[in-house]
Structure formats: C-alpha cells, structure tokens
Amino acid sequence: SLRSAGRPASAVTTLSMSGTQERKKVVVTGVGCVCSTGVGSQNFFDNLVAGKSGIQKMPAWASEMPCTVGSIVDEKSGWTGPEQWMDKKDARRAGRYVHFSMAASKLALEEAKLDVTKVDAANFGVIIGSGIGAVEHFEAEADVFTKAGKGGAGLKAISADLIPSLTANTASATVALEVPLRRRRILSLYICL
C-alpha cells in the first residue's frame, strides 16, 4: 500500500496566496494519476518503485515526427478508454485531455472517499492545468475544411464542436458539471516559451 511504502495517505501543503490574503492550508486527501507510468495512484506508485518507465517507441501514426520515443497513455499503462469514466456520447465529443482529466478527478474523489454532496461548495472546486484543448480535433477538422474546398464550403463542413473542444477550460468545466461542482472552476493555462 502507499502507507507501507512510506508515503502518507494525505499531506498538508501551504499555498502562498497572492496579494494581501493570508496563507491558507490545503489538505490533499485523494490523488488521481493518469499517465504513461500508470493509471491510478497505487498503480503509478508501484510502477515507479519497480523502476518501470512509461517511455516507449512511438506508434505508426507518429512516423512523420522526428522523435521516435514518447510517453503514451494506453492499455500498457492501464488505460481502458474514456467510457469507463464518462458518458460515451460526451467522450466522443471530448478530447483526450478531457478524458484524462475526468478519470484523474474521479480517481482522486474515489481515493479520498469524498461525498461531494456533503461538502460546502464554497470550499471545494476544480483546478485543471492545460496549454490548449483537444488538438486532435483541430487536426481532424483542418482536414475536413481542406477536403471540403476551403472557404464557405469548408466552414460549413467543420464541426460546431470544434471551438468548445479547443478551449483549455473544457476539462475543468466538464469535470465540474459531472461531479457536480457548479461554483468554482479554475483553469491554469500553461505555455511553452
């Protein structure tokens, strides 16, 4: 178990708040991991301790890329697909980053044994960091646009779901609606310089 491996079940972290606000303490009671090293905090931790790496040879679809290795969340890491974590229709419309965010959020809530219906909504929220939304949808819709002949025909051919799937806050909004947490949703936007 995580405790027997020397990792506490929960940890207290002090966050430095900006401005004149006082420092507040946050208790982390559940962790949800979705990464190439393992899906689920225990699976992830066990694989780390065992020295297993999530790095692997890139699949055939990435053959045009200059890098031949990568960190891919797939069945080898324990990923069984988004339908385990969200409605099939919603999963089809959402990007992989939303799938992973939903799975990680539900895993964290499960680990915390937290009943969100009994939590003060003013003290509970969703924070998900992302640089952009579903890039795979952008690539697919760019192909649709090009094949439709560009211009007006191309614009009519692309999905109305493109812009919502591209926005970086889609994951936090989707999780907040599913959980349900309608009051607080925070997006941390990351960029590479």
Image (cartoon, rainbow, N blue to C red):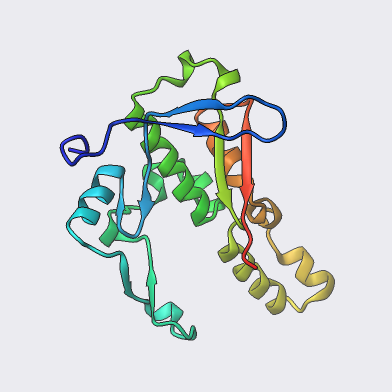
Which residue is rendered at x = 68% and y = 50% of the image?
164
Quadrant of the snapshot with the C terminus: bottom right
Where residue 158 appears, as percent x and y from the top left, is: 70, 64
Q: In terms of image quadrants, where is residue 186?
A: top right
Please give left or right for residue 153 compared with residue 116 in the image: right
Which residue occupies the foreground of this view, 112 or 90?
A: 112
Q: In terms of image quadrants, where is residue 41?
A: top left
Where residue 172 appears, as percent x and y from the top left, is: 58, 41
Where residue 75 appears, as percent x and y from the top left, is: 29, 59
Which residue is rendered at x = 37% and y = 47% of the image?
33
Please give left or right for residue 7 compared with residue 114 in the image: left
Which residue occupies the foreground of this view, 192 or 179?
A: 192
Where residue 91 appears, as percent x and y from the top left, is: 49, 48
Tally of numbered discs: 0
Which residue is rendered at x = 41% and y = 36% of the image?
106
Quadrant of the snapshot with the N terminus: top left
Please give left or right for residue 164 compared with residue 63 in the image: right
Check the image and report above or below for 180 versus 107.
above
Of all residues, the one furthest to the right in this rendering is: 152
Which residue occupies the foreground of this view, 179 or 192?
A: 192
Check the image and report above or below for 55 versus 115.
below
Check the image and report above or below for 12 versus 41.
above
